[in-house]
Image: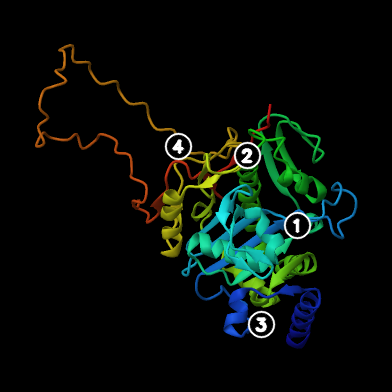
Amino acid sequence: MLVSGASIAAYAAWDVTASISTVSLASDLESGEEGAAPPPSIDAIDGGVNLLLVGSDSRTNQGDAYGEDEGGELNDVTMLLHIAEDHSNATVVSFPRDLVVDLPECPEGGGYTAPINTALSQGGLACVALTVESLTGLSVPFAAEIQFNGVIEMSNAVGGVPVCVTDVIDDPYTGVYLEPGTHPLAGADALGFLRTRHGVGDGSDLGRISSQQVFLSSLVRTVKSDSTLTDFGKLYGLAKAAASNMILSDRLASPDTMVSIALALKDMDLSKVTFVAFPSYSADWVPEGKVAPDTEAAEILFAAIRADQPVAVEAPGGIASVVDPNAPAEAAPADPAPAEPAPVDPAPVDPEAPVDPEAPVDPEAPVEPEPGSVNADGSTVLPSNVKGQTAADYTCSVGNE
């Protein structure tokens, strides 16, 4: 039995490794570890983890189902996963594709200001990683790129994801049509839902990000609830699907590494897995339809991530997502008891009257936490314009009327 089990494990590892396409990041080349990074044991990976996930819009070798090949390759989805060193919390940051940033010098270009989704065409996955490192102050040793067919295969490997919709999502561009209710999405349906922006929220990429967070939070709950992270076979099945359908950085291109990163999430509380969108705003200095980075709010977010602290959004939801009204009772946020109205003092108030600095303060008066402050549970309070949710928040995607 021991020999048989070891043989199966060895074959599974070989089978996954044989399918991998790799690319070197700048950090791989600087460390001299190109293609030679030793894999960790199959256990929760040591140290904090920063993993970049890039979704490419390239139609190369993808068939005719996704429209004409426009000849470019844009990273229209750019997400950074951070797992704390003690594996107590994780944060996933989505970068808007229209976020105008300073692209660093990359192998085939860069060194100028442009939307972040052009980084992939300037120097591949390595250039996207360099751009994210420059923007966040984080080191990114792991990265993966996925295309349309890869999303289909990965969603099939998971077995589908239940997604809640509040009203009709109808997007002729991606072929998505969903009635209100909860839908188990897999394959092409999952891909279409993740791609749609015209069908959700305000039709923007910012709306698409919050709708994607609905899917991702449900994905985390699904993977944890069906014991995927404790099942050797399921983990290697996912690793096989990833290896066959993604381009992986050198340090990620080992089934042991992929499994170890997955296991780092195994015992994590759902409320400590947080999805947020990089804060941005409309500005006169960026082209129409593009957004500028809110550097002040972003620094609060990434200072917390660099310190391995969990983060807390003001309220779950975004442009294209709302709290699920039919969420399980234990998952639904508790409604605070209505406050008794304070008695009204009919006496007029003199606006010029001096304020007594030593006047007593009502200890029961609610105090809004300052952005950057730390809650009792150790989480950093994020500014109100950093939208998102945790994996414990049951939310629904909102259609674009």
Mark 4 burial class by Cα count in 10 Å: few <14, some 14-19, many 20+: few
- Viewer-side label of 2, 4: 2
Mark 2 burial class by Cα count in 10 Å: few <14, some 14-19, many 20+: few
- Callout 3, which amino acid? Glu
Given contact means CB atoms under 8 Å apart, are the residues at marks 4 and 1 in contact? no
Give the answer, above or below, for where 97 lies relative to 363: below
Query: Looking at the image, is mark 2 or mark 4 earlier in the sequence?
Result: 2
The residue under label 2 is 289
- Callout 2, which amino acid? Gly
Given contact means CB atoms under 8 Å apart, are the residues at marks 1 and 2 in contact? no
Q: What secondary structure is found at the residue carrying circle 1?
A: loop
- Callout 1, which amino acid? Glu
Question: Which residue is rendered at x = 76% and y = 53% of the image?
Answer: 57
Question: Which residue is rendered at x = 47% and y = 47% of the image?
Answer: 294
Question: Which residue is rendered at x = 42% and y = 58% of the image?
Answer: 304
**Which one is nearer the viewer's eye here, 259 or 132?**
132
Q: Which mark is residue 73?
A: 1
Using the rendered image of the protein, determine whether residue 275 is visible from the camera's viewpoint: yes
Query: Looking at the image, is mark 4 or mark 1 earlier in the sequence?
Result: 1
Give the answer, above or below, for where 196 lies relative to 305: above
Residue 367: x %, y % from top left? 29, 38
Question: Which residue is rendered at x = 29% and y = 35% of the image?
Answer: 366
Residue 122: x %, y % from top left? 69, 62
Mark 1 burial class by Cα count in 10 Å: few <14, some 14-19, many 20+: many
Q: Which mark is residue 34?
A: 3
Residue 160: x %, y % from top left? 75, 51
**Which one is nearer the viewer's eye here, 126 or 372?**
126
Q: Is residue 114 left or right of residue 191?
A: left
Query: Looking at the image, is mark 3 or mark 2 earlier in the sequence?
Result: 3
What quarter of the picture does the C terminus occupy?
A: top right
Q: CA distance from mark 4 to mark 3?
A: 50 Å
Q: CA distance from mark 4 to mark 1?
A: 45 Å
